[in-house]
Amino acid sequence: MNINKHDAQVEMEMNMTPMIDVVFLLIIFFMIITDLTQQDLEELQLPMATAAVEDKPDPKVIRPIINIPQSGRMIVKRDEYYDPEKDGDDMVRLERFLVDQANRMPKKMDAELGVRLPDNPLMIRADKNTEFKYIQRIMEICGKQGIQIWKLELGAAETEENRKKREAAQE
Amino acid sequence: MSVLSDIATEEIEMEMTPMIDVTFLLLIFFLLTIKFKVLEGKLMAYLPKDIGVNATPAVPVEKVEITIHIPPNKAGRKVYAAGEDKGQPWVDATRRFEFVGREPLYQIGPHKTTKLDEVEKRLLDLNRKDPTAPMTIDCRQGTVYGDMVPVLDAAVAAHFSRITFVGEPKKAKK
């Protein structure tokens, strides 16, 4: 009958090692995720669009994302490729970047023009109050020989109504 | 010697409590500060395939062209987060501004309007008449991204699939 009784003298010790392991793994996970998710996307106020479709990025697909805040600076993965205050009309760095990206993209033969054109899009995420002339400049560069990126994706915020509809459809 | 042998056999235990405290604090900090940024929505558009946006030769194709004008008296007043623009660096959030009283003017063919729902209706009508017609958006001087997106949104909602942009022609250098 003494089996069920605790021996008050015996010190009970919990094995903390697995818990510490898990907690450390969680910390490392959150640290990496925080960095990765914010690398491509700058903090911007995007304009609302009801017809915007959900963006499901495929990490294997080369799709450069250019962020343009109100100042007109052009930022790709935290790197600044153009600053209107410093660079003025000189957009060489952005042009070089786009040439490099266009070269890496898979090409598809265009029947009308008879030339091979990059088949991947370029995403532009601009703040709602960013002057459109900056976006036009990117468009001009995209049309240049050696780049010829013609597919565009323009970032927009989903309306609350749309988000709810999409989530309901997914359920 | 007996003292030394006693020490060797004694079990040394590390005090884990402070480490666990700190670890949990770190975990809570990361959980609270992390923002899972869902990639927002996107709108598809295309650029002229041949050459730059400004140099597209005129082709005899019936297309819908919508022009966004910002009349000087309707450009709106910039209201800065800091109350006024003091030439702060752009990285400073106080340099952020919003437009108050902005009223873009949309022109589809000869028809001009300042109302977006009218633009939507008109685009729907035009697409019903010719569902294959391409569409171009012409953003004139002073337009901001937020003026263009509702128009593109209306065009996508009206089922236009070939949407391209027209650039503001550069002024010739003197």
Image (cartoon, rainbow, N blue to C red):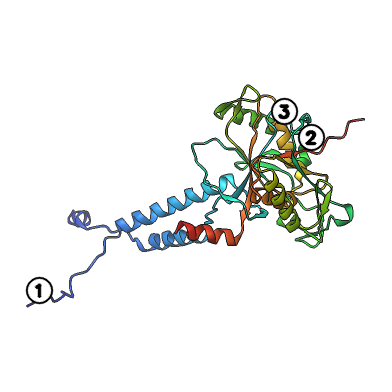
Assign a secondary structure to mark 1: loop
Q: Residues within 10 Å of mark 3 (few under 14, many from 20)?
A: some
Residue hosting label 1: A3
Q: Which mark is residue B51?
A: 3
Residue A160 drawn above or below residue A9: above
Quarter of the image for the N terminus of chain A: give it. Answer: bottom left
Q: Is residue A53 left or right of residue A69?
A: left
Let me know if residue B91 appears in the view: no
Assign a secondary structure to mark 2: loop
Q: Which chain carries label 1?
A: A
Q: Is residue B79 left or right of residue A123?
A: right
Spot occupied by residue B59 in the image (x, y as percentages of width and height): 76, 30
Query: Which mark's residue is nearer the viewer, 3 or 1?
Result: 3
Q: Which of marks 2 and 1 is nearer the N terminus?
A: 1
Q: Are marks 2 and 1 on the same chain?
A: yes
* Residues at circles 3 and 2 in contact by the CB criterion of under 8 Å: no
Residue drawn at (34%, 54%), measured in percent from left and top? A21
Spot occupied by residue B98 in the image (x, y as percentages of width and height): 76, 58
Query: Which mark's residue is nearer the viewer, 3 or 2?
Result: 3
Q: Residues within 10 Å of mark 1 (few under 14, many from 20)?
A: few
Q: Residue A89 carries which label?
A: 2
Let me know if residue A19 appears in the view: yes
Q: Residues within 10 Å of mark 2 (few under 14, many from 20)?
A: few
Residue drawn at (77%, 41%), measured in percent from left and top? A84
Amino acid at pointer 1: Ile
Residue closer to the observer: A141 or B80:
A141
